[in-house]
Amino acid sequence: MKNFADKTIYITGGASGIGLETGKRLAAAGARIVVFDYNLADAAIAAIEAAGTAPVASYQVDMADRAAVLATVALAAVQCGAPDIVINSAGIGITGEFATMKFEDFDRVMQVNLYGSRHLCEAVLPLMRARGRGKIVLVASMAGITPVYGYTDYSTSKYAVLGFGECLRFELKPLGIDVQIVCPGEVETPMVVAERAIIHPATRAMKALGGHISLEQAVDELIAGIARGQALIVLGGKARLTFWMRRLVPPSIWYAISDGIIARALRAGSPA
C-alpha cells in the first residue's frame, strides 16, 4: 500500500460501490482522494475522509457530458492538483432483452460507460503528458469478455471499454502513462442488489459463470492489481477461470455450452 502514499487519486463513481470502497482503502493508505459522481452523497465523502487523514474533494458531474467532464476535471486540477492515478469506476446498466429495450436506455448506457471513459481520458491526458507520468484505470467487466443474455447494452459498452483501454495502452505506454483495465465478475454492489429484483433467469444463469465476490474482496484484488501494474485485472477466482476458458476453448464449444445454459434457464421459467 506504500505505492499510494501522498498520491493524488481521482475516482469517478466514487460515492458508491467499488469506487467508494476503493476511495476508503486508498485514503487509509495515505492518498489524497478526489471524488467525481453523478449522485454525490455527504455520507460517502465523510466515510472516505474518516478512513484517511486528508480532506476529500468532491465534484458532481455527468460522465456522459463531455463539456462538463472536461471543465470539472480542469477545475479539480487547479484546486486539488493533477492526478497521479485516475480510476474510472462510474458506470450504469439497464438489463433486459434487446427486442424490448428502448433506444434511449441503450444510448444512455453507451454514453456513460463508453463515452464517459473517453471523456475522462481526454480530460486527464494533458495533465499526465505534461508530467510524463500517470496511471489510468478503466473499470470494464467480465461482461466485456463473456457475452451475457439480457446484457446487450451493458456488455456492448464494456466490450468497447476493454477495446478502448487496450488500444489506448499501446499509445500511452511510450509516454510513461500506464493504462490498466479491470474486469470484475459479479460484485456485491448497490447496482447488483437492485438488479436482482428484475433479472431474467437466463441472465442470472450466464452471470454465474463469472462467479460472485464480496465488495471487500473485489477492492483487495483491484488495489493489488493496480500496485503491481497489471495491464488486465480480472477480479475473482471463478472469473479468472472463466476468462481463460473463454480465451482457450474453441468458439463453437463455448457457444454450445452457453446455449445450453440459456435453454435450461428459459425452460425453468420466465422473468418475474
Image (cartoon, rainbow, N blue to C red):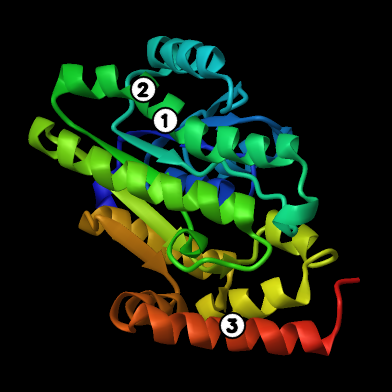
Identity, as a three-letter code, of the amino acid under mark 1: Arg
Determine the CA span between mark 1 and mark 3: 33 Å
* Depicted 16 relative to depicted 171: above or below: below
Give the residue displayed 32% in from the left and 78% down from the top.
Answer: 244
Q: Which mark is residue 259?
A: 3
First reached walking from the N terminus: tag 2 or tag 3: 2
Q: Position of residue 115 (x, y in %)?
A: 49, 31
Amino acid type, callout 3: Asp
Using residue 217 as the reference point, say whether residue 45 is left or right of it. right
Q: Up-down: is 8 above or below 245?
A: above
Q: Secondary structure at mark 3?
A: helix
Using the numbered discs, state the Cα–Cα distance from disc 2 to disc 3 in whole angstroms: 39 Å
| Element under disc 1 | helix
Against 151, residue 263 (above or below) is below
Q: Which mark is residue 118?
A: 1
- Give, as a three-letter code, the residue at label 2: Glu
Q: Residue visible at 41% across and 82% down?
A: 252
Q: Residues within 10 Å of mark 1 (few under 14, many from 20)?
A: some
Q: Which residue is mark 2?
A: 122
Check contact, mark 1 vs mark 2: CB within 8 A: yes
Q: Position of residue 24 (x, y in %)?
A: 52, 48
Q: Left or right: where does residue 171 sit relative to residue 100? A: left
**For mark 2, does the 10 Å Cα neighbourhood hold few (<14), some (14 to 19), or many (20 or more) residues?**
some
| Res. 82 mark | none
Viewport quadrant of the C terminus: bottom right
Q: Position of residue 212 (x, y in %)?
A: 58, 76
182 to 30, vertically: above or below? below
Q: Report, in whole angstroms, how far the alpha carbon at label 1 lies from the one at label 2.
A: 6 Å
Q: In this orientation, which residue lies closer to the viewer: 182 or 44?
A: 182
